[in-house]
Image (cartoon, rainbow, N blue to C red):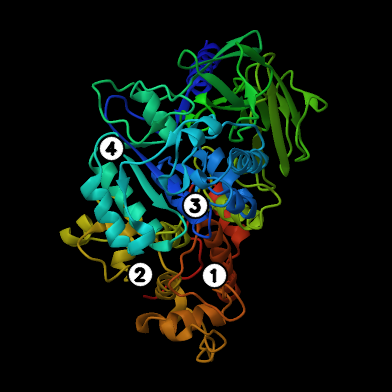
Amino acid sequence: MKKGMLIFLTLLLWAALATAAWAETAPAGGGKLVAVTFDDGPGQYTDGLLDELAKRDVVVTFFVQGCNAERYSSVIKKAYEAGHQIASHTYNHPNLVTLSTAEVQNQLNKTSNILNQAIGVENTYMLRPPYGSYNANVLAVSGVPAILWSVDTLDWKTRRADAVYQHIVNDTKDGSIILMHDLYSSTVEGALRGIDYLREQGYELVTVSELLRRRGITPAAGSRYSNAYNNGQTLPGVAVPQIEAEYVEGRHQVSITADAGAKIYYTLDGSRPNGQSQVYSGPFVLEEDATVRAFAAFSLNGGRSRLAEARIEMPRTPKPELTLLNGQLSVAAAGQVYYTVDGSVPSPLATLYTEPFAVEPGVLIRALALQEGFRPSEISSLYYSPKGNVFVDIEPESWCAEDVDQTVAAGLLTTEQGRFRPNDLVTRRDLATVLYRLAGSPPPEEQAPAKTALAGGDNAAVRWALEKGILTDLTEDSAELDKPLSREQLAVMLYRFGGSTWPSQEVNQALQPFADAGSVSGYAVDALRWAVSQGIITGVSANMLEPSGTTNRAELATIVLRCQSVWAGSFGQTIHEIELQHKGGHLVPALSFAPVF
């Protein structure tokens, strides 16, 4: 019953994950629209402008000169793939009215070829005639819509960011087409400030082609457009595609939906789709995990939706549960379980689990569950240590494994359901508890009510440490007990516990090798000198002590053993003897002396 429920819950979780998708912020429908345009580029500031526009999730239209597009072809491609509209401003900015028909055609065709090569696909490019100069012949020869403007920032003339910004603020209205040039740093600065202002005022910034489409205008070749003021009709933006997956018989069937008439471009490897990506034609089948990303487009050049993404994964087999009881290992899992007892990674070539089996201390067991139609489970590990401890987060190769095994076997540090939590930081309360156990867990003496409250009620170890002066300088907030302990604070508590019982040694020079010895707090100098001279605390490097640094539980296990080695060397008590006393059923005084406080 439990296994069936676990599988059911896992499938529910998978179902949520498989159909969950994120989408870049979709444009709202029915609001105020404006098209920001940049002429004459790309130039040295265009790439940085693209980065800033990306941060704002804003698209614009670039009317580029072919001669500059040759120099900055990678910038053109970057702008196009980010969803900006690319349009033509001729090859080298002549007054088209003064040219012959053949010369006009050459200006436009040459630019289109350069743009197609930079982008990687063939497109048709709207035209902005240089200087806004055109006649009937220019419009007829171009064969594309001509785009003018309704807001002229005069950025080329003033070269002042404030002036650009003020023109945007003062002259823009719903449906405006704003003219700027991305050749000047002042324009980029003023434009970005203006864009931020427009967004704050509720404007949605769109490409020229989207501005016209959403106002119900179908741009015609040979016609000119300078705005798309609100005529009472505002169509919604291109809807973000919806990605859905259904899992049937070990395979996913994926469907992607979007606006009628829009093409959907998608990838399955998590990469950003573009105009050369696969075009969705109907539901398709996935037999392995995939990250689907997609956008919809009425026009690849300036008429795209934001991106949608969905991570689609086969459901994973639940992780096997390993239980060790009286030297017998049992496994609970869905499907078949394969295991190893030498620490190697299990696979279907490993041993198949059929029934509980005996395990000797000093073995690392790893197990993998497999179930038809599901992904393999995560690997479960259980370390049955040489001293008979069970760990799920310590392995034999861990640098701290032997020290942790010894301190846990002695009852000085403990585990919870096999979890030692080696990276958890040590607190005052933690160290007080370890020292209390080392002292044999003596019963607390009579104490003042204030100390009892500070100790947190019935925490005998903390009350004992307060009585003995190991814990001092605490505020009335008992939360101080559970803050991470610094290395110098740790040394002080150890020193107060037993430092004065050691034979006198010359320790004054112990801190000199460390470059940060001067940062040791005054109250901790003697304690750290003692701890370093005894080898209990070592530097974090050859010349750095980091007295304000923290200590984790794995490090504490090592420090406790160093301390015990020093104590046992003077008083004849070994960690082995402490372990034997602990395994006798209760902790008895672990040291053969009464610490002096």
- Name the residue carrying label 1: 563
Mark in the foreground, 1 or 3 = 3
Separation (CA) of disc 1 from disc 4: 69 Å
Describe the element under mark 2 as helix, strand or loop: loop
- Percent across and percent down for residue 482 are 34, 56
Judging by the rendered image, the residue that carries numbered circle 3 is: 40
Residue 312 in the image: x percent, y percent?
Answer: 58, 23
- Residue 568 screen position, x and y as percent: 58, 70
Residues tagged 2 and 3 counted as in contact (Cβ below 8 A): no
Q: Which mark is residue 30?
A: none
Asked if marks 1 and 4 touch (Cβ < 8 Å), the reply is no
The front one of 70 and 259 is 70
CB of mark 1 within 8 Å of CB of mark 3? no
Nearest to viewer (mark 2 / mark 3): 3
Circle 3 — which element? Answer: loop
Which amino acid type is shown beneath numbered disc 3? Asp
Please, is residue 581 above or below residue 232 in the view?
Answer: below
SS at mark 4 in the image: strand
In the current view of this chain or complex, which residue is farthest to the top? Answer: 249
Q: Identify the residue at horizontal 29%, vertical 66% (top origin).
A: 467
Sequence-wise, the earlier of marks 4 and 3 is 3
Q: CA distance from mark 4 to mark 3?
A: 25 Å
**Mark 1 / mark 3, whichever is N-terminal:** 3
Give the mark nearest the N terminus, 2 or 3.
3
Mark 1 or 4: the one toward you: 4
Q: Does residue 126 appear in the picture of this structure?
A: no
SS of the residue at dot 1?
Answer: helix
Amino acid found under the numbered disc labelled 4: Tyr
| Amino acid bearing label 2 | Ile
Residue nearest the observer in this picture, 561 or 102 = 102
Query: Which residue position holds label 2?
Result: 470
- What residue did someone put label 4 on? 203
